[in-house]
C-alpha cells in the first residue's frame, strides 16, 4: 500500500456517511460457513462496523444497554437494517447520513411522547419547535430526515417490538440468527422467535479478519498517526523521565494527530501508575497503540538512552532482524504457528542468542482482533491461516531480563495475494537519544 496517497480525514468521514466499513462479501461467506440467515447487532463497535455509525449511548460510554441495533441478512446483504429510538435517529443518525440502503425501524420510549399505540409515531417534531428564529443548518437537516420517517408503519412503542419488526421485515424471523448482546436473545425469546439464536462474538471477529478497502484506508490513517506519535515520544526521551510522563506525552502526541491513545508500554511496563524513571545507558522498548474512528495503530521500536550494553544492543538487532525475516515470508496460507518458527529459525541461523517472542495478531477495531478459543481456563487465538486482506502485526519483543533493558520491533502489514506490504512508512528499528 502506497501510504503517500492516503485519503485525508474528511474523505474517510465522507465514506463513512455513505457506507459501513464492513467487508460485506466476507460477512456473507462467514454467515454461510456458520449457517446463519443473518446478524442482529447491538454492541456499538459492531453497529459501527455494519453501518459506519457509532451509537450515541455507546460512544459516550454511558454504561447502558444498547439502544441502537444493526441488522444484516445473508440473502440481501446490501439492504441493511437500523433499529433505534426516534430521538436518537433525529439526534445522532440524521446528522451524518441520508442512506437509501438502510431500512429504518424506530421506537419511542413509552410515556415520553404520549400514550400512542405501538406502530404509531406522533406527527409533532421530535424536539419542541418555536418560530422565534429560522432553523439552523443542523436543525433543518435533522427535521428533513426525521420527517421522512415520521408516521412510518415500522415504528413501534418499544425497542423489542422494533427489533422483531425489523427481523420480520428483512426476512430474518424464521432463521438461525447470530447476536452479540444478551438483550437481543431475550427479545427473541420473549417474542417466541422460532429459529435458533447463536452468540456471534467469534463469528463477528472472523468477519473482521479480512477487511474492506475502506477499512484498509482507515487502518493506514490510524497507523501512520500512531507511528508519528510514538516516534515523537521516543525522540523526546531523556534520562530521568518517568513512565507516567512518557505515557502522558504519547496521549498528547496521538491527540495532536487525530488519534486517541489506548496504551503505551514503556520498557515492558504499561501501568499508568508507574513512576519509574528512565536511566542513562538504558535500552528500552516503546510499544504504542492508539485509534482513529475505532481503528487501531500498533507500532513498537527500541530506544537507546545513551550507550547501550552490548547484550541489549544485540537483542535489539535480533528483534529487528527477526521481524524483517518474518515479514519477507508472510503470505496467504501461512499459519500463525508457522510464524514463530520462521522468526526463531532466522535469528538462530544468524547467530543471535537473544530470546525473542514472535506473536502474530490481527489488528483492526480491536488491538487483538481475531476469534479466540477457551484453553485451560484462558482465552487464546486459534491457529489462524493468513488470507489476503488481513492486517497483521507480529510482536517481536525481547524476553530476556538482565541484559540492560528491553527491545521490540513491530509494524502493521497488509496481507496481499502474494505476500505482504506495510500500511505505514517503515522506520529505523532503533531510536537513539
Image: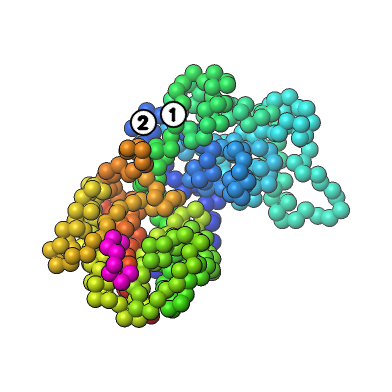
Magenta stretch: residue 402 in it? yes
> Secondary structure under badge 1?
strand
Front tag of 1 and 2: 1
Instruction: From this view, report whether residue 165 is shown above or below residue 240.
Output: above
In this rendering, would 128 be left or right of 319? right
Q: Nearer the viewer, residue 407 or 252?
A: 407
> Secondary structure under badge 2?
loop
Instruction: From this view, report whether residue 315 is shown above or below residue 35.
Output: below
Which residue is at a point 40% across and 60% down the rendered structure image? 298
**Horizontal and vertical percent position of residue 200:** 43, 34
Q: Are marks 1 and 2 in contact (CB under 8 Å)?
A: yes
Q: Which mark is residue 198?
A: 1
State how far apart marks 1 and 2 are (Cα): 10 Å
Which residue is at a point 46% across and 26% down the rendered structure image? 197
Q: Nearer the viewer, residue 174 or 428?
A: 428
* Magenta-tinted stretch: 397-405
Which residue is at a point 72% across and 56% down the rendered structure image? 137
Q: Quadrant of residue 409?
A: bottom left
In this rendering, would 80 be left or right of 203? right
Q: Which residue is mark 2?
A: 34
**Horizontal and vertical percent position of residue 371:** 37, 42
Q: Nearer the viewer, residue 205 or 91?
A: 205
Crowding near the residue tagged with mark 2, few <14, some 14–19, many ≥20 C-alpha atoms within 10 Å: some
**Horizontal and vertical percent position of residue 84:** 62, 38
Instruction: Examine the rendering and report whether any part of residue 291 can be seen.
Output: yes
**Horizontal and vertical percent position of residue 325:** 21, 62
Label tally: 2
Which residue is at a point 49% across and 26% down the rendered structure image? 172
Magenta stretch: residue 363 in it? no
Q: Quadrant of residue 318?
A: bottom left
Amino acid at each position: 500500500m502506497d501510504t503517500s496517497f492516503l485519503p485525508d480525514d474528511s474523505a474517510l468521514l465522507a465514506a463513512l456517511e455513505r457506507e459501513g466499513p464492513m467487508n460485506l462479501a466476507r460477512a456473507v461467506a462467514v454467515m454461510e460457513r456458520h449457517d446463519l440467515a443473518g446478524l442482529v447487532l447491538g454492541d456499538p463497535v459492531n453497529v459501527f462496523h455494519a453501518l459506519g455509525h457509532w451509537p450515541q449511548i455507546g460512544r459516550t460510554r454511558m454504561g447502558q444497554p444498547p439502544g441502537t441495533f444493526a441488522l444484516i441478512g445473508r440473502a440481501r446483504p446490501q439492504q441493511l437494517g437500523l433499529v433505534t429510538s426516534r430521538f436518537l435517529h433525529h439526534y445522532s443518525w440524521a446528522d451524518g447520513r441520508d442512506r437509501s440502503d438502510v431500512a429504518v425501524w424506530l421506537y419511542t420510549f413509552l410515556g415520553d411522547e404520549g400514550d400512542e399505540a405501538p406502530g404509531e409515531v406522533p406527527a409533532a417534531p421530535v424536539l419542541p419547535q418555536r418560530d422565534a428564529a429560522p432553523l439552523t443548518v443542523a436543525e433543518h437537516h435533522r427535521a428533513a430526515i426525521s420527517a421522512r420517517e415520521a408516521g412510518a408503519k415500522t415504528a413501534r412503542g418499544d425497542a423489542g417490538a422494533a427489533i422483531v419488526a425489523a427481523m420480520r421485515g428483512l426476512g430474518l424471523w424464521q432463521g438461525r440468527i447470530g447476536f452479540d448482546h444478551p438483550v437481543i436473545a431475550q427479545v427473541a425469546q420473549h417474542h417466541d422467535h422460532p429459529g435458533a439464536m447463536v452468540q456471534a462474538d467469534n463469528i463477528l471477529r472472523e468477519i473482521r479478519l479480512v477487511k474492506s478497502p475502506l477499512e484498509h484506508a482507515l487502518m493506514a490513517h490510524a497507523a501512520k498517526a500512531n507511528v508519528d506519535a510514538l516516534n515523537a515520544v521516543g525522540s523526546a526521551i531523556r534520562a530521568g523521565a518517568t513512565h507516567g510522563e512518557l505515557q502522558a506525552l504519547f496521549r498528547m502526541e496521538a491527540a495532536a494527530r487525530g488519534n486517541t491513545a489506548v496504551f503505551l508500554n514503556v520498557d515492558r511496563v504499561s501501568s499508568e501508575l508507574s513512576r519509574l524513571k528512565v536511566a542513562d545507558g538504558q535500552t528500552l522498548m516503546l510499544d504504542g497503540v492508539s485509534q482513529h474512528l475505532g481503528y487501531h495503530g500498533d507500532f513498537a521500536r527500541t530506544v537507546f538512552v545513551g550507550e547501550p550494553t552490548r547484550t541489549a544492543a544485540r537483542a535489539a538487532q535480533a528483534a529487528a532482524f527477526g521481524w524483517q525475516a518474518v515479514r519477507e515470508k508472510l503470505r496467504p496460507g501461512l499459519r500463525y504457528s508457522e510464524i514463530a518458527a520462521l522468526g526463531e529459525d532466522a535469528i538462530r541461523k544468524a547467530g543471535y542468542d537473544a530470546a525473542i517472542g514472535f506473536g502474530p495478531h490481527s489488528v483492526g477495531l480491536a488491538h487483538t482482533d481475531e476469534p479466540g478459543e477457551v484453553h485451560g481456563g484462558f482465552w487464546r487465538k486459534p491457529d489462524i491461516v493468513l488470507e489476503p486482506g488481513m492486517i497483521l502485526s507480529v510482536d517481536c519483543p525481547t524476553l530476556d531480563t538482565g541484559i540492560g533493558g528491553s527491545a521490540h520491533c513491530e509494524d502493521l502489514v497488509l496481507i496481499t495475494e502474494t505476500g505482504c506490504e506495510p500500511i505505514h512508512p517503515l522506520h529505523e528499528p532503533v531510536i537513539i537519544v
